[in-house]
Amino acid sequence: MSSENNMYFDPYPQRVMDFLNYSSTIRGKSDSTIDAYRYDLGLFLRFLKRYRHLVTADVPFENIDISDIDDDFLKLVSLSDIYAFLSFADKKRMNSAYARARKTACIKTFFKYLNLKARIVDKDPTAELESPKIKKRNPVYLTLDQSRSLLRSMDKDNVNYHRDYCILTLFLNCGMRLSELVNIRISKIRNDTLTVIGKGNKERVIYLNQACINSINQYLPAREKKQIPDASKDFLFISTHLRPINKRTVEVVVKKHIRGAGLFDNHYTPHKLRHTAATLMYKHGKVDIRSLQLILGHENVSTTQIYTHVDNEDLREAVNLNPLADENE
């Protein structure tokens, strides 16, 4: 078992548990967000106990007990302590700027809770805390021709062809998240709409185009031939073990077909297909940024802005359209 998993099961201070319960029940944060909070705070508090020399050097970092951390301990946390932790995350644990930004956001949210909700700290030490700068990268995506090649390259004789084709079609046309896809319920499909539970446990409606509707209708007859247990019958996508398909299986399915089509490499993930759908809608469908925000289920339009990039093809075309492009000496 990894050190991260060990941290997950260790006892946590009551204030941390209160914060996690508040984040889950009141703020409606998803299970994955709560898990991230739990892990990051465990790491932070273990670091503080070592940083303050409250444990001997021979105690392995993962075994540092944090269950005894009380309000007095938390009241002494300073901005300098937090910077020291972020330096530790960078230098010792080789965390990327993205990972450190996540930890920063978690710590800020925790101390905001301690200050404004629990009211155990008079001054929030994170008030002036800045998040590490993250270099913005254009999303990696398949072109329109590559997307078509991917779908056309699939083996129609494969026993899971209709299921896998439907999965890829929904990813490429709807831009849904992996967590949304694996939890699709048949009872939530109504004509050309599909209701899913998105990020932060928020319900949203996804509109299905004709390609999506056709792929679902072609998959359902093959699905109905299976002896699916009653507990799993409402889930659209079923594994070969007759259970609701899980995220890992979908990741394997995507990589398999991407590789089979001769596109990219093994690191191409379902999330990249979400990028593809968004980029194709913006570039070829001329979907405006606000509509794209709603389609993707982004809380802030700033997240959607990454799809307004122009690729090398656009730049090449722009240069070739210069009226002087055909002039010779």
Image (tube, rainbow, N blue to C red):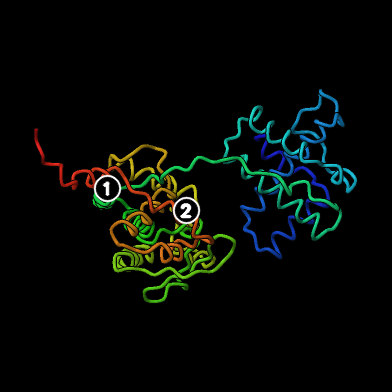
Seen from the viewer's position, the closer of residues 23 and 110 is 110
> How many marks are shown on the rendered structure?
2
What amino acid is labelled 2 in the image? His
For the residues marked 2 and 1, what is the alpha-carbon distance in whole angstroms?
Answer: 46 Å
What amino acid is labelled 1 in the image? Asp
In the visual, does 89 lie left or right of 292? Answer: right
Secondary structure category for the residue under label 1: helix
Residue ranking furthest to the front? 329
Q: Which residue is disc 2 drawn over?
A: 241
Seen from the viewer's position, the closer of residues 195 and 142 is 142
Seen from the viewer's position, the closer of residues 96 and 251 is 96
Q: Position of residue 229 (x, y in %)?
A: 50, 64
In front: mark 2 or mark 1? 1
**Label 2 CA crowd tier, 10 Å (few <14, some 14–19, many 20+):** few
Q: Position of residue 130 (x, y in %)?
A: 66, 44
Q: Which mark is residue 271?
A: none
Residue ranking furthest to the left? 329
The structure residue drawn at horizontal position 45% and vertical position 62%, both measured from the top left corner, is 293
The structure residue drawn at horizontal position 26% and vertical position 45%, both measured from the top left corner, is 313
The structure residue drawn at horizontal position 37% and vertical position 76%, both measured from the top left corner, is 191
In the visual, does 82 lie left or right of 302? Answer: right
Q: Which residue is disc 1 drawn over?
A: 314
The structure residue drawn at horizontal position 27% and vertical position 44%, both measured from the top left corner, is 315
Is the residue 325 above or below the residue 25 in the image? above
Toward which corner of the image does residue 210 lie, by quadrant?
A: bottom left
Of the 4 image quadrants, the one containing the C terminus is: top left
